[in-house]
Amino acid sequence: MEITWNDFEKIELRVGTILEVLDFPQARKPAYKVNADFGEFGTKWSSAQITRHYSKEELVGRQVVGVLNFPKKQIGPFMSEFLLTGFVDEQGDVVLTRPDKEVPNGTKII
C-alpha cells in the first residue's frame, strides 16, 4: 500500500535518549520498561521486548527512535506512552532503530 508524503509527515518519529531501564516481570514476554527523553516533547515510558539483544546497562544513554503520536497503550499494570522502533532479526528478536550520530532529542525523522 502506498502512502503520500502528507501521510508520512503525520507520523511523529522522533529521537530520544534512554534515561532509565527497568525490569518488567509482569509482561507476558520478556520486556523492559524504558524511559526516554524526547526533548521538548518530554520524557516518556515504553514497554519494549528487547531483552535478548540488550542489557539494561548498555541501553542507558543510547539514542533511539520512537513513535510519539500513537495512543497510549495499557500493558498489564503499565501505561506505554510511545512505540520504540526496531527491526526483527532472523530469530524474531528486535534490533533497535537509532541514528548513527547523535542528534538533539526530539528531532523528527525526515
Image (cartoon, grey):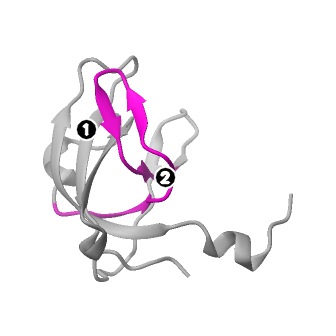
Q: Which residue is mark 2?
A: 86
Q: Quadrant of the C terminus?
A: bottom right
Residue 51 visible, this angle: no
Give above or below for 91 relative to 99: above
Give whichever of discs 1 and 2 has the lower sequence position: 1
**Place of residue 54 in the rendered image (x, y in percent of width and height, measured from the top left):** 28, 44
| Amino acid type shown at disc 2 | Gly
In the image, residue 6 lies in the stretch drawn in magenta: no
Q: Secondary structure at mark 1?
A: strand
Mark 2 residue crowding within 10 angstroms, few (<14) / some (14–19) / many (20+): some
Please tell me which residue lies in front, 75 or 84: 75
Q: Residue 78 got which mark? A: none
Q: How far apart are the two marked residues, 1 and 2, measured between alpha carbons?
A: 16 Å
Q: Secondary structure at mark 2?
A: strand
| Amino acid type shown at disc 1 | Lys
Apparent side of residue 75 relative to residue 2 in the rendered image (left or right):
left
Residue under the point 72% across and 77% down: 6
Residue 49 visible, this angle: yes
**Place of residue 106 in the rendered image (x, y in percent of width and height, measured from the top left):** 34, 75
Mark 1 residue crowding within 10 angstroms, few (<14) / some (14–19) / many (20+): many
Magenta span covers which residues?
Answer: 61-86
Quarter of image, res 100: bottom left
Residue under the point 37% across and 70% down: 15
In the image, residue 83 lies in the stretch drawn in magenta: yes
Q: Which residue is mark 1?
A: 33
Residue under the point 51% across and 51% down: 70
Q: Are marks 1 and 2 in contact (CB under 8 Å)?
A: no
Give above or below for 69 relative to 78: below
- In the image, farthest residue toward the front: 71
**Place of residue 5 in the rendered image (x, y in percent of width and height, measured from the top left):** 74, 78
